[in-house]
């Protein structure tokens, strides 16, 4: 039996990338897994908080972040090894970008990485993430490290049917629309995108930018303040959709000429995959982790945080119809991973 950890994701009210990974994998694992939570010092069934009795062939599988502070007694549980232990690793962004990460997360991340080394099997969400984790284990001096494989996350973010034709209707406003999807925070780099679009609007380029995402309560308000200032100046050319439902996000994809993903750091970069699933080209940061998927077609990688290069790239995707059509044809024709395939990878690895 697989006991699937939903300690955080089962009660969370928002749809972060980590939460979506957990929910989509749980959905695809189906009857092969039971949901469990860490409650009062022990793992218990999520449904009724019944205590568990493990067998050596059972697996505990988590895609969550965890620490002894959040889960008192969890380190002893891992050390006692009542069953086999498997985890999905996302990234070490709190250690690589501490200045834009909540201090509590920065402080707890080294301990999380150490606890992760006690597992029997770990899947990383990208090759770059895999190499990063192994490098941090070397830095931390952990003496027992499990094998780490890559788990290709699914592009079918809401279970929708993939778009497989390059034709799409024009936006209702008559102007091409760009879509930026992600939590509002410095790591996602919406500030640079806003300044780039501001300059393009001042140069009379006609288009709309739709920014979709919840606001990071610690780092997001200054970005939102700048966004609202630009809204007062440019009106409906800039629109902000906070906390949009899956249905509203789908509507935004349907109207978008391209998505823009100027992020500074990622573990995988789900918005890029999800954009391609919808048949929408993606202008993305030229990060190694994003190139793992961008190089397959349908994307325009741009130097990270390079204002001049982003301005050129956005102008091209908005005005060069032949180039846009080429990217769109690549997006709808290339192979893309699914969550069902990701679940099958886990089941094979766990021998279930």
Image (cartoon, rainbow, N blue to C red):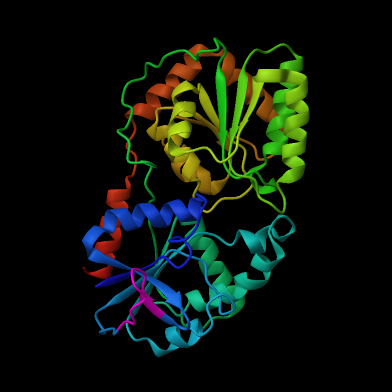
Q: Residue at x 40, y 17 (%)?
A: 168
Q: Residue at x 32, y 32 (%)?
A: 162
User: What range is drawn magenta here?
Assistant: 43-52
Dominant SS of magenta comes to loop
Q: Residue at x 56, y 41 (%)?
A: 243
For the C terminus, the image quarter is bottom left
* Rendered view: 218 above or below 171: below
- Please name whichever residue, 133 or 116, is drawn nearer the observer in this view of the structure: 116
The verdict on residue 44 being magenta is: yes
- Number of marks in the image? 0
Residue 320 spot, x, y in % from top left: 55, 14
Q: Would you say residue 126 is visible in this rendering?
A: no
Q: Residue at x 71, y 19 (%)?
A: 235
Residue 146 spot, x, y in % from top left: 41, 75
- Please name whichever residue, 336 or 26, is drawn nearer the observer in this view of the structure: 26
Quarter holding residue 79: bottom left
The verdict on residue 28 being magenta is: no
For the N terminus, the image quarter is bottom left
* Rendered view: 10 above or below 210: below
Residue 120 spot, x, y in % from top left: 37, 77
Residue 97 spot, x, y in % from top left: 69, 57
* Rendered view: 77 above or below 196: below
In the picture, measured across the screen, residue 42 lies left or right of residue 56, that is right
Q: Would you say residue 255 is visible in this rendering?
A: yes
């Amino acid at each position: 039996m697989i006991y699937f950890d939903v300690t955080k994701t089962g009660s969370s009210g928002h749809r972060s990338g980590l939460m979506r990974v957990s929910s989509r994998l749980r959905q695809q694992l189906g009857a092969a897994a039971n949901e469990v939570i860490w409650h009062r010092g022990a793992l218990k069934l999520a449904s009724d908080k019944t205590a568990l009795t493990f067998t050596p062939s059972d697996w505990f599988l988590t895609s969550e972040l965890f620490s002894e502070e959040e889960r008192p007694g969890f380190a002893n549980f891992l050390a006692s090894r009542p069953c086999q232990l498997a985890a999905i690793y996302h990234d070490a962004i709190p250690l690589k970008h501490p200045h834009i990460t909540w201090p509590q997360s920065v402080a707890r991340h080294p301990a999380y990485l150490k606890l992760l080394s006690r597992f029997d099997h770990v899947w990383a969400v990208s090759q770059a993430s895999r190499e990063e984790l192994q490098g941090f284990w070397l830095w931390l001096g952990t003496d027992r490290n499990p094998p780490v494989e890559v788990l290709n996350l699914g592009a079918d973010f809401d279970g929708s049917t993939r778009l497989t034709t390059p034709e799409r209707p024009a936006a209702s406003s008559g102007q091409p629309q760009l879509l930026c999807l992600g939590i509002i925070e410095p790591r996602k780099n919406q500030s640079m995108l806003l300044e780039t679009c501001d300059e393009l609007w001042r140069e009379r380029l006609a288009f709309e930018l739709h920014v979709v995402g919840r606001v990071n309560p610690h780092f997001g308000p200054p970005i939102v303040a700048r966004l609202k200032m630009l809204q007062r100046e440019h009106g409906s050319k800039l629109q902000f959709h906070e906390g949009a439902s899956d249905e509203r996000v789908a509507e935004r994809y349907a109207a978008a000429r391209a998505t823009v993903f100027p992020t500074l750091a990622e573990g995988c970069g789900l918005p890029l995959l999800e954009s391609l699933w919808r048949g929408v080209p993606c202008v993305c940061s030229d990060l190694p982790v994003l190139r793992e998927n961008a190089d397959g077609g349908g994307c325009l990688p741009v130097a990270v945080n390079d204002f001049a290069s982003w301005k050129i790239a956005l102008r091209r995707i908005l005005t060069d119809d032949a180039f846009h059509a080429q990217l769109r044809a690549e997006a709808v024709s290339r192979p893309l991973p699914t969550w069902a395939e990701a679940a099958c990878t886990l089941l094979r690895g766990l021998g279930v």
